Image (cartoon, coloured by chain):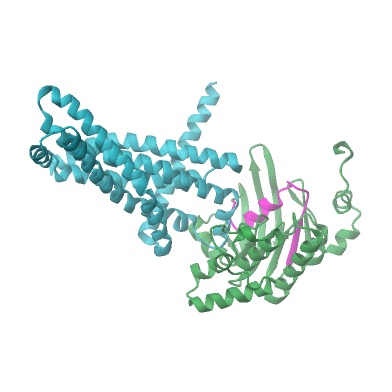
Amino acid sequence: MIFAANKRVTESLAGLGRFTLLAKETAASLFTFKVAWRDLIYQIFFVGAKSQTVVLITGAFTGMVLSAQTYFQFHKVKMDTATLAVVGVSMCSELGPVLTALMVTGRVGAAIAAELGTMRVTEQIDALRTLATHPVDYLVVPRVLAGLIALPLLTAESISIGIAAGYFVGVVLLGIDPTYSWAHMLKYTGDTDVAIGLIKAFIYGGILTLVGCYKGMTCGLGAKGVGKATTEAVVSASIAILITNFFLTLSLERLFNAL
Amino acid sequence: MIEARHLQKRFGEQSVLNDLSFRIENGESVAIIGRSGCGKSVLLKHLIGLMKPDAGEVLIDGENIVPMDERQLLRVRRKFGMVFQSSALFDSMSVAENVAFGLRRHEHLTGAEIARRVAHVLDVVDLPGTENKSPAELSGGMRKRVGLARAIVYQPQIVLYDEPTTGLDPIVADSIDKLMMRVRDQLQVTTVVVTHDMRTARRVSQRVLMMHDSRIYASGTPDEFFASQDPVVRQFIDGVADDKKN
């Protein structure tokens, strides 16, 4: 039993080491490699444009339920007009970036892991290497770059639609005073909240694409290996995003307060 | 020139390559034969740096590629073309895009020049006019041909074939054999063929290396192999299974 636990810990640490090396190789390639624009544009389309529906629905319903729930609680203490302020701050700095990243992880992270995993088991990645092409340059860099570009844009979209939907629920359905609500939201939702949300989204874009690439490129053999890699990509990236979110919230708040 | 010196490779408890050494001269055509699972494909992958040995050296034109990292290996790999057992075509690309991949990545050619070279090499492999087909539309033999076209389009010095005729019917296998001979003679490339098909080995190679027990067991011309009375060689050529495995 101790032997098995030891083996598991060793394998986990070795995996972390391999992931770090992939991240290092990707970072080095990002700064030195001439990006294949055609691949990058396709990946931005795949990560960004094709995630529109899921991001819009997630953002809208999160804003709506947040507005309704906040109103129900605040109404008890006659603070109805603070509802949109809570929606604004929450959507900008926490719910917008985190929920967008989690939803995109489910769609894009899984797809990346499955695609690269299939390429690995059918020797297409080895074929790339024999054609004197580094897999990180050709496969990883365009996907990670697309994640870094698309996630902040998707998050901005999610925040906007979330606030708009929250406003609709609060003002139109629940009858909160629109003028005071809007004024309070603008007062308490600062540039800092928006900046924190977009910085988080940028980092999550890198995490979810890099984890997807790593799981795909190191997947086991056969259909079972590809399936396992796909599941692990979603689970690992989601957990990494949630843990990272805590530390980013602490560090970014302190950083912006110090500035 | 390709030289392997004292290669050793293990997967867990299983030794796949054990103190294995050989040398292949420029322009030579060599077949590596041996029973399924004896490590032929593993050996081939060591020659192009897709796998690293636990010990030993692989020299390409006198340069040891074992200590090189993936980025350093890219320069060496431009000397190689490799045809995979599974063809390993990029399934998201058309035939033309597959064949043109190496040209687009490494040579500064116009679109028209790339199209001309792709059409030429598809003609060489007897697949003219298939540029716009997808790999999924091709038969096994056609996929092997496209894989070969992709491997030779940028005129490498060395072409590696991993089980080129496995899974093909005898007529298609014969056409692939003839194609390999044509590529060998027209392009004057060094050819290394991993196969367990003795007919392919005999027709394509000038020299045969036989792997057995994780090392090069025998080496000689195809005629010497077919005339050999060594029991291990004889058993492989005659295709006789051990009694205990019957």
Query: Can I make out residue B111 in this image?
Result: yes
Residue A162: name its quadrant.
top left
Q: Which chain is green in the picture?
A: B
Task: Identify which residue, A98 or B189, lies in the foreground.
Answer: A98
The image position of residue B27, as x and y in percent, is 70, 71
Shade of chain A as shown in the rendered figure = cyan
**A257 left or right of A206?**
left
Among the 4 quarters of the image, the one containing residue A203: top left
Quadrant where the N terminus of chain B sits is bottom right
User: Residue at point 45% right, 45% down?
Assistant: A212
Q: Give the answer, above or below, for where B207 lies relative to A144.
A: below
Residue B24 makes an appearance in the image: no
Q: Where is residue B90 in the image (x, y as percent from the top left)?
A: 56, 58
**Picture coordinates of residue A4, whole percent (x, y):** 54, 25
Q: In this view, does A221 lie above or below A73?
A: below
Q: How many labels does the image show?
A: 0
Q: Nearer the viewer, residue A72 or B1?
A: A72
Q: Give the range drawn in magenta.
A: B29-51
Q: Which residue is drawn at 42% across and 44% down?
A: A107
Residue A68 inside the magenta-drawn segment? no
User: Is residue B30 shown in magenta?
Assistant: yes
For the point 37% across and 41% down, the residue is A103
| Picture quarter with the C terminus of chain B | top right
Left or right of B165, for residue B109: left
Q: Which of B80 and A62 is in front in this view?
A: A62
Q: What percent of the width, then of the height, locates residue A156?
A: 25, 48
- Asked whether, in this view, residue A174 is left or right of residue B147, the answer is left
Residue at horizontal 36 percent and vertical 50 percent from the top: A147
